[in-house]
Amino acid sequence: MPKLKVAFFWYGFDGRYGVWRDGLWRAMHIIGETHDVRYFDVNEKELINCKEFNPDIVLFWEAPCSCRGQDADMWFKVCRLPYKKILLFAGGPLEAMEVIDFDLVLVESQINEDDCERQGIQYMRAFGINDEIFFPKELEKKYDGMLQATCAGWKRQGLFAEAMKDKGILCGRDQKNDPQPFIDARRFGTPVLPEQPMEEVANLINQSHCVINTASFWGGGQRATLEAMACGTPVIAMDDSPKNREFVDESGFGMICRPTVDDIRKTVNELKERNLHPSNGRNYILSKWTARHYAENIMKGIYRVLPSKQQGGAVLGA
């Protein structure tokens, strides 16, 4: 199989969003075992470096809302790179005109597949988590509920804290432009930890009876849901959060409730009584949402855009 030159763009892949060792990080390193993968930050210097690299394909992990925000100028400069391009869709609304410069969009959730079908956008599903970091551990349960998420109104950490009080724990990256959820959480007596190394996040998940994902419709959070399942910890998702309830409904490893304090408290107690076996969640992840699944689907997307580059049926090296 010929080695491909793959350019991967992400805003601050080594720092802006903390320690990047999630499923996408692991997937790209799996791809890098058989192909030449180079990483580029989104700035003028790196655009020049990318052109010198002269890739076969450009991958860009970002939300299309960047084309309307403070990063709009760089978004369009990446879009004008003279190579085949794939957008790894990072959330938010999905509109056809905003992704017209990409040959393919890789989405994470069924709701985004439906959006693509409706608008005639070329897409595939590609998603997974770092199953080498997130796995079941025999740790004492210290918390009724846990949530890992960047502080943001659409994550609704204040709702989590009001329901859990000191029986829950939060961790995540603070945001100066959206601080209220963590302020509310501390007011309700819920411990709030800063962004943690992923190994410590996995420990906190394993020390909790469940992960309570209070993300709203646009809140995303599906990676946190799958990371919990990989640890054998069931998930409570809100009924107005399709990106999370999709995985809970399909796996049966957790429960769905309304985004109210009383419903969350009631559902936590019901879920604790069910005592779901950790292997049920872990096996669901191993069936389709590992980092290797992620890597294989990214490569399928690349060969869909570059069909002449694939030889035989393999998409990844042995």
Image: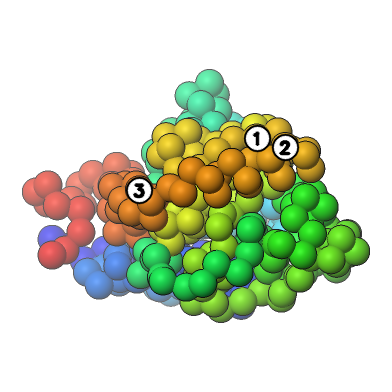
The Cα atoms of the two marked residues, 3 and 1, are separated by 20 Å
Please provide percent x and percent y for residue 19: 56, 76
Q: Which residue position holds label 3?
A: 280
The Cα atoms of the two marked residues, 2 and 3, are separated by 24 Å
Q: Quadrant of the N terminus?
A: bottom left
Reply above or below: 63 against 227.
Answer: above
Q: Is residue 47 left or right of residue 69?
A: left
The Cα atoms of the two marked residues, 2 and 1, are separated by 6 Å
Reply above or below: 222 against 33.
Answer: above
Verify CB contact (< 8 Å) between mark 2 and mark 3.
no
Q: Which mark is residue 263?
A: 2
Type of the residue with mark 3: Asn
Q: Residue 257 carries which label?
A: 1
Q: Is residue 131 left or right of residue 198?
A: left
Type of the residue with mark 1: Cys
Q: Which of 102/312 is in front?
A: 312
Type of the residue with mark 2: Asp
Between disc 2 and disc 3, whose residue precedes?
Answer: 2
Mark 1 crowd level (few <14, some 14–19, many ≥20, 10 Å Cα): some
Mark 2 crowd level (few <14, some 14–19, many ≥20, 10 Å Cα): some
- Secondary structure beneath label 3: helix
Q: Is residue 78 visible?
A: yes
Q: Quadrant of residue 151?
A: bottom right
Q: Which mark is residue 278?
A: none
Q: In which quarter of the image is residue 317?
A: bottom left
